[in-house]
């Protein structure tokens, strides 16, 4: 394909960065992509088969400065949220949704609440070593009977002298098997619905049990069922104010959903690029299949979906980094990109034909991994309900 036909990142147009990206962000993108393709991609098949990637990769990411990108330099970060957005897109090139999710859950989901709501002592205890990759954190909210309805959670914290006793279960927790600390949503004993939700940072120890769950995709990440059997949590592990956990959850959702949107764009780009190459090389009836009108039209439709998702996501990102209320825009971006990512992966698989169904090309993995998007971080149905209410309906 000509240069005009190749999808290029949104922040490179006619060689010039588009705000909020800068020339430094473009240089970082090139550097990050090179590291990911050299240090993560070659191991993706092995880690997928093992259904695990080494904990040492957190340290390797930290050495590159990746974990601390969005965090305050006072705690070892860079304070550059836009660079973190670039990395979220580039992680799609690691070859495994599970690896991207496992590392991302620590960086983008579990550490941010500590950074935003933690005390100075808590930041020193958990955020600083987390940025260094010396401590692994996971966010524990979802329960067997409380997914989209987070106000329905039942894991209970009973007040005792010096802290609380926590009992209950969490499920579908990314990183939950390997995490040293769990940023956990609990319900204070005797409360109902939103008012009693509180966050406690629960350190791995007696009474805390994690077991892996088997999944359709994201095989390299550990997704856990977690049981708390009368776990004592000291009062200094209270994150934020008691009873204010629902607000913390809502604050965290925006960045999680935005990074999911950015990651979906990166994933679609990878599938698209790989499939264009395949279609140009694969011959049928005496010519490359890319010369067939039906195949060209498929690419045209996919390219349009990718660029639409990019436009929505970048608009939401610009609003977010400018400090504007971007709930509607982030919700739209998340809703559109997650469905589009699965549709693009499925279409790319179809163009590959039988080869796409085989493990060798990685397209079947991309399709399986993409299927979580319309579920995780808030289902499509929840996204539509949020938008419906914002539209006054």
Image (cartoon, grey):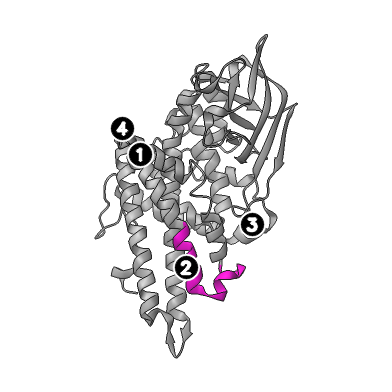
Q: CA distance from mark 4 to mark 1?
A: 23 Å
Image marks 2 and 4: residues in contact by CB distance under 8 Å: no
Residue that badge 4 annotates? 323
Q: Label 3 belongs to which residue? A: 48
What secondary structure predominates along the stretch shown in magenta?
Answer: helix
Q: Residues within 10 Å of mark 4 (few under 14, many from 20)?
A: few
| Gap in angstroms between the C-alphas marked 3 and 1 | 39 Å
Indicate which label's residue lies in the foreground, 2 or 3.
2
Q: Which of label 3 and label 1 is nearer to you?
A: 1
Earlier in the chain: of badge 3 and badge 1, it is: 3
First in residue order: circle 1 vs circle 2: 2
- Per the image, label 3 sits on a secondary structure element best described as helix
Name which of mark 4 and mark 3 comes first in the sequence: 3
Q: Secondary structure at mark 1?
A: helix
Distance of mark 4 from mark 3, alpha carbons?
A: 38 Å
Q: Alpha-carbon distance for marks 2 and 3?
A: 21 Å
Q: State if disc 3 and disc 2 touch (CB < 8 Å).
A: no
Tell me: residue 39, above or below residue 153: below
Residue in the image at 53% along x and 75% along y: 353
Of the numbered discs 2 and 3, the one sitting upstream in the chain is: 3
Residues rendered magenta in the picture: 342-361
Q: Is-magenta flag for residue 196?
A: no
Residue drawn at point x = 45 percent, y = 70 percent = 275
Q: Quadrant of the N terminus?
A: bottom left
Q: Residue 220 location, x and y as percent?
A: 63, 52
In front: 39, or 250? 250
Disc 1 crowd, CA 10 A, few/some/many (<14, 14-19, 20+):
few
Residue 277, how many percent across, how many down?
Answer: 44, 74
Task: Using the image as rendered, state which of residue 356 and residue 35 is in the foreground.
Answer: 356
**What number is the disc on residue 348?**
2
């Amino acid at each position: 394909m000509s240069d005009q036909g190749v999808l290029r990142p949104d922040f490179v147009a006619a060689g010039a960065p588009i705000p909020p990206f800068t020339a430094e962000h473009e240089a970082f993108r090139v550097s990050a992509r090179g590291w990911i393709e050299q240090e993560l991609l070659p191991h993706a098949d092995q880690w997928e088969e093992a259904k695990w990637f080494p904990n040492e990769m957190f340290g390797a990411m930290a050495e590159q400065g990746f974990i601390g990108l969005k965090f305050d330099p006072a705690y070892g970060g860079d304070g550059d949220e836009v660079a973190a957005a670039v990395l979220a897109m580039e992680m799609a090139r690691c070859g495994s949704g599970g690896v991207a999710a496992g590392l991302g859950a620590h960086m983008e989901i579990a550490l941010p609440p500590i950074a935003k709501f933690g005390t100075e002592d808590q930041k020193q205890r958990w955020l600083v070593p987390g940025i260094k990759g010396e401590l692994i954190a996971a966010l524990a909210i979802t329960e067997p009977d409380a997914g989209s309805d987070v106000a329905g959670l039942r894991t209970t914290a009973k007040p005792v002298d010096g802290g609380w006793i926590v009992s209950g279960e969490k499920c579908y927790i990314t990183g939950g098997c390997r995490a040293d600390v769990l940023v956990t949503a609990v319900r204070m004993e005797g409360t109902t619905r939103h008012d009693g939700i509180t966050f406690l940072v629960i350190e791995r120890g007696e009474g805390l049990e994690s077991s892996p769950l088997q999944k359709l995709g994201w095989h390299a990440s550990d997704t856990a069922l977690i049981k708390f059997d009368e776990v004592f949590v000291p009062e200094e592990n209270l994150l934020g104010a008691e009873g204010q956990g629902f607000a913390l959850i809502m604050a965290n959702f925006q960045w999680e959903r935005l990074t999911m949107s950015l990651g979906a764009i990166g994933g679609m780009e990878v599938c698209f690029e790989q499939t264009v190459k395949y279609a140009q090389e694969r011959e049928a009836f005496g010519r490359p299949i890319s010369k067939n009108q039906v195949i060209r039209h498929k690419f045209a439709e996919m390219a349009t979906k990718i660029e639409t998702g990019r436009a929505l996501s970048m608009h939401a990102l610009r609003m977010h980094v400018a400090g504007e209320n971007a709930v509607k825009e982030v919700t739209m971006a998340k809703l559109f990109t997650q469905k589009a990512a699965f549709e693009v992966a499925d279409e790319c698989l179809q163009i590959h034909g039988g080869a796409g169904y085989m493990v060798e090309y990685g397209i079947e993995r991309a399709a399986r991994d993409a299927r979580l998007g319309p579920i995780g971080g808030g289902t499509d149905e929840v996204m539509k309900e949020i938008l419906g209410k914002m539209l006054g309906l």
